Amino acid sequence: MAMAKQQHHVVAVPVPAQGHLNPLMRFCKLLAKQQPGIIVTFVDLDFAADAADAPPLAQEHHNPCPAAAAPHSLVRRVRLPSRGVDLSNGFSLSFLEVFHAFLSIAPDLEQLILSLSRHGPPVTCLLSDFNITLPTQDVADKLGIPRIVLYPCCASRLLLTHYLTQGELVSLEEVKEASTATGIEMRKVFCKLAGLPTLRNEDIPHFKHVTDETVSLWINSTKSWQVCATRAHAVVVNSFEDLEASTFATLSKCCNVPIYDVGIWVESLNEESATSLWEEDKGCLAWLDQQPTSSVLYISFGSITILSKTQYEEFLNGLLASKQRFLWVFRAGLVDDIDYSSSVAQIVSESDGKGLVINWAPQQQVLAHPSVGGFFTHCGWNSTSESIANGVPMLCWPYFADQPLNARFIVDEWKVGLRVKCSKENTGLIEKGDIDKVIRALMEGPEGKLVRENATKLKERCGQCSLENGSSYRKLKALMKSLE
């Protein structure tokens, strides 16, 4: 008699930031839908100030049936209180401090996995974000289970990280020099990296947030990639072959670990977001219903971006000067040193009835709405991929991390967006006229018409790869077969 196949039980560990929670949860749902009988347990890391006082395995589910744990969900969730840093007020702090705090989860994560295995089907796979590699790979190795890495950025950023880890074609010193260049210099810096276009200073990922941690975090990334490349079972990238064909081809040649491009995943329009850190204001959808087709500029700079008061004022004045309808996600903490309530009231009153300001949006539903004609974005990969999936052209104003590289591909490679440009060298300030000009170009000009057409075509290509027998569909099947 043939032995029955072992039931898969995947434990997923995210980085507790909005742009990382979304893709991991979406991939977990994809696994659960595509693989009948699979159990997926999603671990919510709680780095709140009082988390250390909670029981180490709070809210553990003992029932092995995921439907019993969450009747309307394909994925069950457990909470793992964590220590070392307080993220209850967001990420207005050192990222290096956050990554060091991630190391502390290993003992409790190990005990959680052992407990889940005792009370239900044994855990057969650990799925975790690239940025939480060190503790999760150690736990997977200790327990003898394979680890799948979710890389939450584009494949091109992964390839650049690979080259930096190898150290032969590009060095940390070169990255530091390129990322600290001032003004709008367009010097070509890396032009012989297979699988990547020639990269300029402004394309290089940097980590200037509360403080400049560019070199430290690149070192952290190279250490993580070295671990993934030598010890992980596989790497999953939230992208698709047709989008980054040369990059994926190069990765497959130069990396030993299997890399699977399993597509861009977004929720269906009738599906609730399960990982939003803020309450979504769905009232904005009714407002969008009242606007003409493709007339609204959706504005969101993600969950981490911080603008100076001066830069905010220039942006606001440029937006108002453009005379366009807009929906602006203006979260508390976006701008330094302002009174939030009075600023929101000012924006609404000065928009002459053309603008709506909310704290957080159901972004997938907004981008899918026919009234939305453009997306003014910080170019985080989560926002970029959602915009691609919905065929919405972008205005690119990258803040940090992978965002400058994403903007380069959006504008120059895929040609589905326009770049915000500074008209004055060495000031670092995007002025009112710069904002007004680029908004009008997207919403009214011939450039906007062209990138809108390109965005529609790219949306179709994105959808095709996930159809049965599409490239991403086949890669997902191959990934699951590799675990048998």
Image (cartoon, helix red, strand yellow):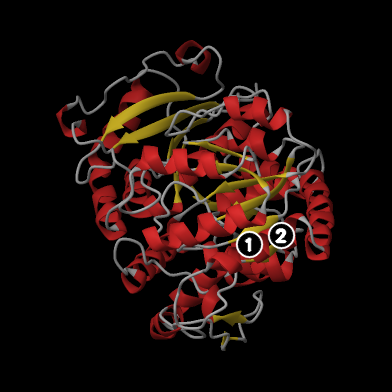
How far apart marks 1 and 2 lie (CA) works out to 6 Å
In the rendered structure, the answer to whether residue 303 lies left or right of residue 142 reads: right
Q: Is residue 401 above or below residue 301?
A: below
Q: Return the x and y of residue 167 as percentages of the image width and height.
A: 45, 82
The residue tagged 1 is: 436
Q: Which numbered disc covers residue 468? A: none
> Which residue is drawn at the image coordinates 39% and 55% (left, top)?
306
Q: Is residue 173 above or below residue 415?
A: below
User: Dot 2 lies on which element?
Assistant: helix
Q: Return the x and y of residue 105 as percentages of the image width and height.
A: 26, 42
> Which residue is drawn at the image coordinates 55% and 65% (left, top)?
432
**Quarter of the rendering containing residue 5:** top right
Badge 1 amino acid: Asp
Q: Are marks 1 and 2 in contact (CB under 8 Å)?
A: yes
The residue tagged 2 is: 440
Instruction: Using the rendered image of the protein, determine whether residue 366 is visible from the camera's viewpoint.
Output: yes
Q: Return the x and y of residue 107 as percentages of the image width and height.
A: 23, 40
**Quarter of the rendering containing residue 246:** bottom right
> Which residue is drawn at the image coordinates 41% and 51% (left, top)?
304
User: 208 or 41, which lies in front?
Assistant: 208
